[in-house]
Image (tube, rainbow, N blue to C red):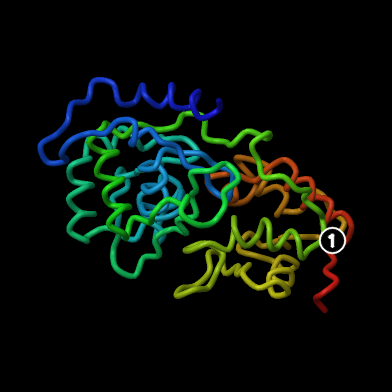
Amino acid sequence: MFARRVLAAAALASLGFACEDGLGECDLPAAQEVVYSRSNLVATKGQALVHDSCGQGAFCHSAAASGSARRGVPASLNFDMLPRATGLKRVLELREEVWSTVHDGTMPPRGFAVGDSDWSFEVARPDGETRLSALSTRAGKAALRNWLACGAPVVVETGVPEWAHPAGPVTSSWNDLHSSLMVPKCATSNCHDARGARAAGNLDLSNLCEARSALLKSGTCGEKRVVPGDASSLLIDKVTNTAPECGTRMPPAGGVTAQEIEALRSWVTQGATAADCP
């Protein structure tokens, strides 16, 4: 029911676009098929691939990227797809060029980690055959080509509704918060991990105990990220507000649920403790 409602809105983006010679034929139903992410976002297949591979809402082809984070991308060349497809107009203007650079391997540039490709065709996001292929694969490239050929249809309502979230309570224990929130939504490629490059903001959240220690220290904003017992700590501000007092919203594309925010706030107010860490 939700998917059909989204597709009806997404179809508007493709009206008036005929097939282009350089892009080949359009299979519109395939281009409009939706996928779901572990960070509770929903998108069409091409929309998800562009988000993952062109900036992830924070780097390169993103309006939120500045300075070295743009990695040489011109200031106006923004392809943001999530949480809102504000870059759709530019993608449509340059869709043949976008496909050409992906097809010949020019983009994404070598050495740039291309998202985590953790998108599924099922709301519950199980592993296996239901997952969307990464752009680096033949199937991923085919999905992008078809999406561009069909006029790049996008999902307008990007958040997975509360009733569609996987079942199971979100607890305020650090172990659970780290595995269910920090790892899948923060310690991703080119963000708060240290795989192959320096972690964003010098904050590596990939390790259970080191992540907690780092959150208790001061960051680039000059204040402690988490003050045990203080529900107004910087970390809470960054995940709850679209315009936090310091820096930008985290994660840049949103996707943290109300239950996760409440569990995180509870962990902070209860002293930000961790049973398995010193």
Does residue 14 lie above or below 91 as drawn? above
Neighbour class for label 1 at 10 Å: few (<14), some, many (≥20)? Answer: some
Residue 166 image position (x, y, % from top left): 67, 45
**Viewer-proximal residue among 160 and 199:** 160
Label 1: state its secondary structure: loop
Count the marks: 1
Please tell me which residue is depicted at 59% across the width and 36% down the height of the picture. 160
> Looking at the picture, how far across and down is residue 234, in whole percent?
71, 53
139 relative to 119 in the view: left or right: left
User: For the point 53% across and 43% down, which residue is it?
Assistant: 122
Farthest residue, direction left: 21
Residue 26 image point, x, y percent: 22, 33
State the residue at coordinates (33%, 55%). Answer: 135
**Residue lying furthest bottom:** 278
Give, as a three-letter code, the residue at label 1. Answer: Pro
Quick one: quadrant of the N terminus? top right
Instruction: Look at mark 1 in the image and give the residue it sits on.
Output: 228
In this image, 277 relative to 94: left or right?
right
- Most distant residue in the front direction: 129
Q: Quadrant of residue 210?
A: bottom right
**Image coordinates for residue 92, horizontal then vertical, percent:** 26, 34
Q: Quadrant of the C terminus?
A: bottom right
Vertical relation: 264 (above or below) 71: above
Drawn side of residue 266 relative to residue 125, left or right: right
Front residue of 76/159: it is 159
Q: Tell me where residue 123 sits by quadrant.
A: top right
Viewer-proximal residue among 58 and 244: 58
Q: Is residue 43 above or below residue 38?
A: above
**Horizontal side, residue 84 vs residue 77: left or right:** right
